[in-house]
Image: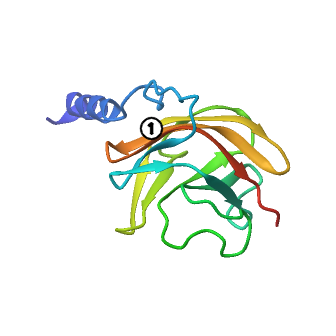
Amino acid sequence: MKGPAGWGLLLLLAVGCGGGGDGGGGATVSSQPLAGKIGGQAWAFTTGETSDALSTSEQLWVDLYADTFDACVAFGAPPNADLVTMMMPRTPGSYNVSLTLNATIYVASTSTNYVATSGRLVIDSVTATTITGGLNIAYNGDNAVNGQFQATICPP
């Protein structure tokens, strides 16, 4: 189609591709500990830490792992671990996961990053030492997590 009718149809299709109008897709965050699947395998959150070098004055770079280790220790995180990585606001609130506030699900066995662009992030509190909240994201059925987390804010 040419002209305004064609552009109107194109705009309607583009808007329709965005999914649930709120960007969160109506996602609710579980009150249980963060868990789900990464790479089709069961995954349950254990340790979280931030990166001062990758964080900004408004957002914290947060890595969430299923492995137990001492957070904020240089090279403390396991090198071949599945994880969820996300830039999280430093301000408590409920946020729609979107193209601009997305989360990456990393599958170590294949070195694959899956970027979730819908879901919900809830930041309950941010102190000098921790960020606490909940996250519900899914790329697909084999790469999805939902639940509560607490990550250590690493000093500069």
- Residue situated furthest left in the rendering: 1
What residue is shown at x 39% (from left), y 69% (from top)? 111
- Kind of residue at disc 1: Ser
Outermost residue to the right: 128
Where residue 17 sits, quadrant-wise, is top left
Count of numbered tags: 1
Which sits in the foreground, 7 or 30?
30
Question: Is 134 located above or below residue 100 in the figure?
Answer: above
Residue 68 horizontal side relative to residue 90, left or right: left
Relative height, residue 31 to residue 82 (above, below): above
Image coordinates of residue 48 in percent, x first then y, are 65, 54
User: Who's the residue at 32% across and 51% down the image?
Assistant: 40
Which colour assignment does the render follow? Answer: rainbow
Left or right: residue 111 compared with residue 84: left
Identity of the residue drawn at 54% across and 41% down: 34
The C terminus - image quarter: bottom right
| Left or right relative to 52: residue 7 | left
Of 81 and 57, nearer the camera is: 81
Residue 106 in percent (x, y) is at 45, 60
Q: Residue at x 44, y 38 (%)?
A: 118
Among all residues in the image, which is located at the extreme front? 68
Please provide percent x and percent y for residue 32. Answer: 56, 32
Neighbour class for label 1 at 10 Å: few (<14), some, many (≥20)? Answer: many
Q: Give the labeled residue for mark 1.
A: 118
Position of the N terminus, as image quadrant, is: top left
Estimate the x, y position of residue 139 in percent, counting from the top left: 37, 45
> In what element is the residue under mark 1?
loop
- Position of 22 with respect to 71 (left or right) is left
